[in-house]
Amino acid sequence: MSGDRPDGSEDGDVPQSRYDQARYVENGEYEPLLSEKDLTRVEISGDNDTDGSPLPDDLTRDSLELPELSEPELARHYTRLSQMIYGIDSGPYPLGSCTMKYNPTFTEDVAALPSAAVHPDRTEASVQGTLEVLYRLQDYLGRIGGMDAVTLQPPAGAAGEFVGIRVAAAYHEHNGEGHRDEVIVPESAHGTNFASAALGGYDVVSLPSDDDGRVDLEALEAALSEDTAALMLTNPNTLGLFEREITTIADMVHEAGGLLYYDGANLNALLGRARPGDMGFDVMHYNVHKTFATPHGGGGPGAGPVGVVSDLAPFLPAPRVRERAAESPAGEPVYERFDPEHTIGKVHGFDGNWLVLLKAFAYIARLGDEGLADASASAVLNANYLAERIEYDVPYGPFHHEFVASAGEQDAADVAKRMLDYGVHPPTTKWPEIVPEALMTEPTEVESKDTLDRLAAAFNAVAGEDDDALETAPERTTARRIDQTTAARTPRLSWQALEDDA
């Protein structure tokens, strides 16, 4: 590393190896981060004597074996590996519910701008641009969802669910109704709904569907009580069906003193057309990877903002961002962080995963109102077109952005494996259980007619095959069928485990 030292001295004034392991104090003095004994041992070359090492013996070694490969060998190796992996950049990825949507590269360009590389410990005065983006994203999401306030902290959709449940709990506790200890969850809901409610300390009450695949109002009436804290609902639901009685459902929950929670997994079907807040929902999370084309968080390195109505706003995590009443001397808005009055506290460091949030902001800003509405229209059109083209039965409808077909007499898992041989990624299988041998499919708005036709051809080719072909699939992929039971019970998480088999 080159450049001046903090005291104005040049690199050569202090031995490089010493400088790398010391910190500047003052007046040209450096304080070692290691003792003189450790520094001496680190700087000795030749024999790697580990005597005196702070590491245990089983973590030290006398030699380090590194592969000796040329640059072309290395480049070709990793290129081959990349070609063996199927991803959204390779083709359609129609995983119903667990949507993998193509992320446009322009959002990556925005996140890579030098001005986006902001250290979170900088003063508010020096990061006004960053705070403005966060403030505007809060506003965007609030208006899109019909919510009065938004927190950007949660690092994934599931984390957003948990935050929403904790906000609901704090609200009830504040109002002297901490006795409410039940959360109602439809049987077709995402598994994270059940987990989030339980993790939040609630007893989970499962709600059956009616013959049309929607909420059974009689069953809901029987489930509601003075112990009800919330009903968690996805709309459209996991069958792609819009809950036509949603306002009645909201009234029933509110009359019982509970809150209505919106799982934002399927918001992509409603963008620019309907808002959860207008339907009567009190709290919701946004799956920005499913709706606003950010990378999938996988449980942590993503974003799952939470929106609430005004009554719940004082309980949101801290901090949030707001616009000060007073402007700057130049007449520009000034933004600041603040803690809501009855906040549940921090749920993530600083303002959340800033660069993921920036990508969501860029996506929304570029599409605008018309673009978002067009995205939802295309998502619904693509799902309905694909469903019409496949030979498998789709028992429930009319649906919106996704549908659940039935593999009938075939095993849905075998169907999925065989589809890999036709060069496409299969849909979600075996869920929701309301459909036998379920093939849950969501093409999203990004796929073209040609791509949808190719997907339909793969579905139909597999539909016409016998059990022998399905049971041995896949045959054309790099890896053949694995023993999923053994893989789950005794996973091998390192290449070194292969040596044990040998």
Image: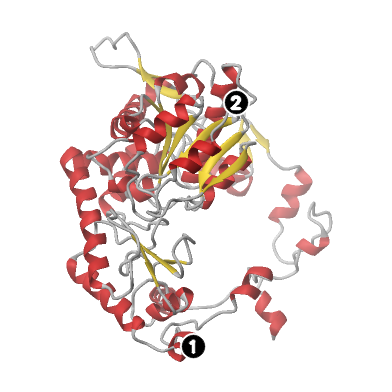
Q: Name the element at disc 2.
A: loop
Tell me which residue sits at (56%, 16%) in the image. 175
Would you place residue 112 above or below residue 44 in this image? above
- Tally of numbered tags: 2
Label 2 sits on residue = 26
- How dense is the environment of label 1, judged by Cα within 10 Å: few (below 14), some, or many (20 and up)? few
Residue 406: where, in percent of width, then height? 39, 70
Q: Kindly give the residue lying farthest to the front in the view shown.
A: 218
Would you place residue 406 above or below residue 361 in this image? below
Residue 423: where, in percent of width, then height? 33, 78
For the residues carrying marks 2 and 1, which lies nearer the camera in this image? 1
Please state which of residues 280 and 128 is positioned toward the viewer in this rendering.
Answer: 280
The amino acid type of the residue labelled 1 equals Thr
The answer to whether residue 206 is left or right of residue 354 is: right
Task: Choose top left, top right, bottom left or bottom right for residue 487.
Answer: bottom right
Task: Choose top left, top right, bottom left or bottom right for residue 478.
Answer: bottom left
Residue 309 at least partly seen:
yes
Please state, as top left, top right, bottom left or bottom right, where the C terminus lies in the image.
Answer: bottom right
Tell me which residue sits at (33%, 71%) in the image. 393
Would you place residue 251 above or below residue 378 in this image? above
Residue 417: where, in percent of width, then height? 44, 78
Tell me which residue sits at (76%, 61%) in the image. 59
Please state which of residues 490 and 438 is positioned toward the viewer in this rendering.
Answer: 438
Please state which of residues 65 and 205 is positioned toward the viewer in this rendering.
Answer: 205
The answer to whether residue 45 is left or right of residue 336 is: right
- How dense is the environment of label 2, judged by Cα within 10 Å: few (below 14), some, or many (20 and up)? few
Label 1 sits on residue = 472
The amino acid type of the residue labelled 2 equals Glu
